[in-house]
Amino acid sequence: MGRRGYPAEFRQRVLDLVAAGRRVRDVAVDLGSSDQTVYDWRRQERMDQGIEPGLTSAERAELAAARRRIRELEAELAIHRNAAELLKGTTSPKGDSRPSR
């Protein structure tokens, strides 16, 4: 199962039932889901097919991965900045004022 809780195959079967003529409300009640969930799945499918404007599922996944990577890099950068700040006031253990070669 994905983050949303329903496997892609399940979502596709639900959309197939709706496309075959069943009412969204009836399908949602039969499956114990909300009708808004089915409408959202149908809207996303239309975006994936290029019928409706918006981000496709692949684009959404890529954007989420990019945002996750950016958060990781920002955290890493903050660690390096903090380390540099801490080391700024330190002196050489030998007490030498000359830089090492």
Image (spheres, rainbow, N blue to C red):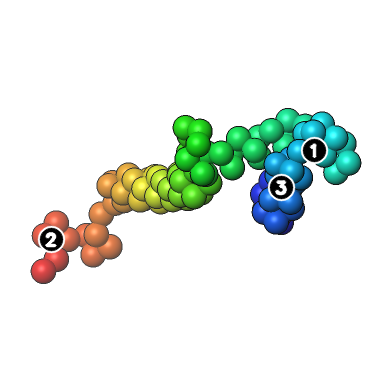
Quarter that holds the N terminus: bottom right
Which residue is situated farthest in the front direction here?
21
Q: Residues within 10 Å of mark 1 (few under 14, many from 20)?
A: few
| Residue 78 visible from this viewpoint | yes
Residue 22, label in figure: 1
At label 2, the amino acid type is Pro
| Residue 91 on image: x %, y % | 25, 54
- Name the residue carrying label 3: 16
Circle 1 SS class: loop
| Residue 79 visible from this viewpoint | no
Residue 99, label in figure: 2
| Residue 88 on image: x %, y % | 27, 47
Mark 2 or 3, closer to the camera: 3
91 displayed left or right of 74: left
Q: Residues within 10 Å of mark 2 (few under 14, many from 20)?
A: few
9 displayed left or right of 94: right
Circle 3 SS class: helix
Q: Earlier in the sequence, mark 2 or mark 3?
A: 3
At label 1, the amino acid type is Arg
At label 3, the amino acid type is Asp
